[in-house]
Image (cartoon, rainbow, N blue to C red):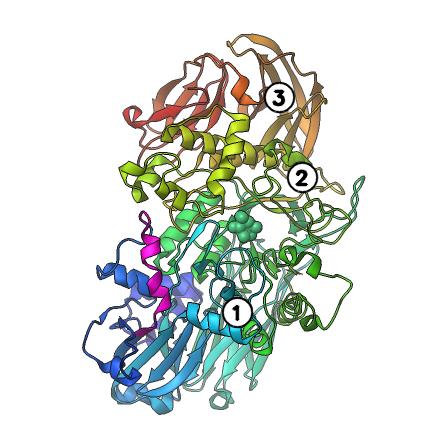
Amino acid sequence: MKGRLKEFMVVEALSGWYAVQKQALFTAFFERNVYSVNYRDLSAGWQLKQRNAEIALNDDFVSADTWIAASVPGVVQLDLLAAGKIPAPFEGLNETQLQWIGECDWLYRTTFSLTAEDLAHGALQLCFDGLDTYATVWLNDTQILQSDNMFVPYRLDVKALLQEGNNELHILFESALLRGKELEEQNGGKLPLWNGDSSRLYVRKAQYHYGWDWGPIFMTAGPWRAIHLEAYEVRIADVHCPYEVAEDLSSALLPIHVQIENGERSTAAELSVALYNPAGVLVAEQTVPVQSERTDVQLTLEQVELWWPHGYGEQPLYRLETIVRDAQGVLDQHSLVLGLRRLGLIQHALQDEPGSSFYFEINNTPIFCGGANWIPADSFTTSIDRARYRQWLQLAVDGNMTMLRVWGGGIFEDATFYELCDEMGILIWQDFLFGCGIYPAVDWFKQSVRTEAEANVRLLRHHPSIVLWCGNNEDYAIAGPKYDPTVTENFEETAFPARVIYEQILPQVCAQLDPTRPYWPGSPFGHGPNHPQGSKVDDTTVGDTHVWTVWHGGVAYQDYYKLAGRFVSEFGMEAFPVMETIKEFAPESEWYPQSRTLDFHNKDAGGPRRLAPYIVDNVRVAADLPGYIYNTQFIQSEALGSAIRGWRRRWQGPGREYTAGALVWQLNDCWPVTSWAVVDYYLRPKPAYYTIKRELARYAVGLAQHESEPVHAWAVNGEQREVQFELELRTWNLAGELLDEQSQTIVLPPNQASELATLSRPQGENWVMQARLLKDKAIVARATLWPEPFKYLSLPDPEIEIEQIDENSISVTAKRPAKGVWLNAPGNLTWSDNMLDVLPNDPQIIQVKGYDASSVEITWLGK
Ligand code: BMA
């Protein structure tokens, strides 16, 4: 701790230029990787207006009319909304009225002032962390930048252009939609894609801005990330630590590469690196003379506190402090947060099944990656702050999700997102930003992609949470027959030119800048003879797969168990959000299942129609909106629950890791909508969220009966040691009479599923089976098996009762078997469990804060 405080004082001394409150600086210092060079945030005083094409650009920039206050970081739509110029974008059908914004050009301007002292620094650089997307920037009337890639941060030397007193910054953002269409025309025309306008393939802008099958079209423009000015003599430009934890996990080697800018000033300087352990104690340090471009140092740790995903261990974080100093004192310092873990992506031969495994290993422990896909949490990402990211990620952790896949049609999330994942122990599968298209591979495009990849790999590579770089989302799948694996070069001459990006450029960038992390060409990817979904890369015996035969293909969700791959990185089922969310965007006159507004807030082509067969096949159709919402949510809950149950069952221990991942499409939404999300835009979980949570819990038990087979019971022990349980199996009739009961003591091997029992299926349809797993007399997992389809069952009133046990818990009981008991209350009640199957003599205890019986609405199947 002492060491930390000392460094903190240094930062403070250097930052006089920027009057930061101690507390703010302290927070920044400990939560982020900060530079101690003089840093001035340039977020203040910005204005924006729509470009008036009738007058010259210069005149437009100085014109007095119609400027509104602009946020930086920000996008045009949010400022127009704040200024009262446009209606709420997510409400009703407003999206259609707001498309003009994306077809206009926009001007931003601000003024900042500098003193002679400021200008005396050796280097002054203007930094743009992200400009969305076609931006031209002028500083004091000199053009300093033309940018065409929102994912590329820029750092420009501007010392010669700055002046004492006022300085002016002007930015023109040109319509990405119109520029993209021009590029499309100039570069060979429309290319195949799913979702959005085809011109998006030529534009390095978040692809979902063009509209997706869950997202509206909002073509944003603006400085979506910070703008700041840095003044320094010598700057630590980059610190990279591709550490290696020894195979026996006892020690670690930390090679450290430090890049220093303005090295000529630092020839007499020395560089110190100091590693602080998670308790803040200095555990290793070294001081060496600064080399001109790159200085290399190496530290060794004889004992390592390992970083683990949550549920497997702690998330200790080390800090690597780098300081450059000369005789006069500290020139710059840099701080990097590190989590030390040993990572592997294991693809080995399997016993009794063809192909190979595809699982992640952390610290030599194989990890079953249950979790979800992550899309940008808003159409306007600048509105997502640290607190909101934390809420989202906490939901993932509380939902027992080990991995999130940051999907390629979105963005490299803000640093905050990855910092929180490091802190909370969430594994991240990170796609590069390409989705569902045949992308061009003309020279300027390739160059832009390389720059973008290099910049973002540098920014993100120190995060222990990130365990994979992946080339794209579904671009191999859309290529279909255009993808010929026997062709291995000159991809630009083929009908699938972007293979040069996924198979050459990106792996090269990763190998060079981040050699300790695996790279995977695409999601899905994997060659083999088995491709039931008709794509050459969706083989179920190797690599990862997306299972969309259910939903897009209309196959029954009960078949999920047959569709397993080695790692299912996408599968999903749509459901309505809760009524409270619908009320946020739809007027009361639209509160019926197929209203224009509700159809509009389902962006999957034919989405509302695709829900219908799943409802018709499984449950009794409801015409009222609450009943319809419940039906869609029930189906989603059943579908996702059965998928994960069946696939985690295939995680069978060493040499039998038949399925090692199940990532639900999708965790979140970017606006209020009926989609595959299991938590809606307002962070309100759908019932499926709780079902998934149970299926991914440390201990889980399963019951299944497929076709003419008997009933099988199995259980998963997610602990890293053998555990003894009591397994109870009961059969009831639907009137609540116990028909059969048995129990046995079982010992489950660690970190795998084990088959436990085979039972015969009761006759007829008047039964339900229940399995319970008890550990030290406490119930730790439950499963039920019902005759299906549910629509044919005659379910008597279960007589559900809820009793408040204490301030934080309730108990839910039923006299007769109840399916899908959903407790819904307005406000932000968080339930430890919900969407329950409740059987007689089996009270279920739920943790809930702020429970108020009068406001809770209870629904169940057949109510
Ligand atoms: C997946 C995703 C998205 C899409 C989803 C649902 O394949 O990669 O492109 O939103 O399917 O169709």
Check if residue 332 falls in the magenta segment: no
The residue at which mark 2 appears reads as 563
Q: Residue at x 48, y 42 (%)?
A: 607
Query: Marks 3/1: CA distance?
Result: 59 Å
Q: Nearer the viewer, mark 3 or mark 1?
A: 1
Q: Is residue 101 magenta?
A: yes
Residue at numbered disc 3: 726
In the rendered structure, the answer to whether residue 257 lies left or right of residue 679 reads right
Q: Can you give x and y, in whole percent of width and height, for residue 212 in the image?
A: 47, 54
Question: Quick one: label 1 or label 2, which is nearer the N terminus?
Answer: 1
Under tag 3, what secondary structure? strand
Q: Position of residue 351 (x, y in %)?
A: 80, 41
Q: Of callouts 3 and 2, which one flags the residue occurring earlier in the amino acid sequence? A: 2
The residue nearer to you, when weighing 401 against 767, is: 767
- Residue 375 location in percent, x, y? 48, 53
> Which residue in the structure is indicated by mark 1?
202
Closest to the observer: 576 or 521?
576
Q: Residue at x 69, y 72 (%)?
A: 493
Mark 1 to mark 2 CA distance (whole Å) = 35 Å
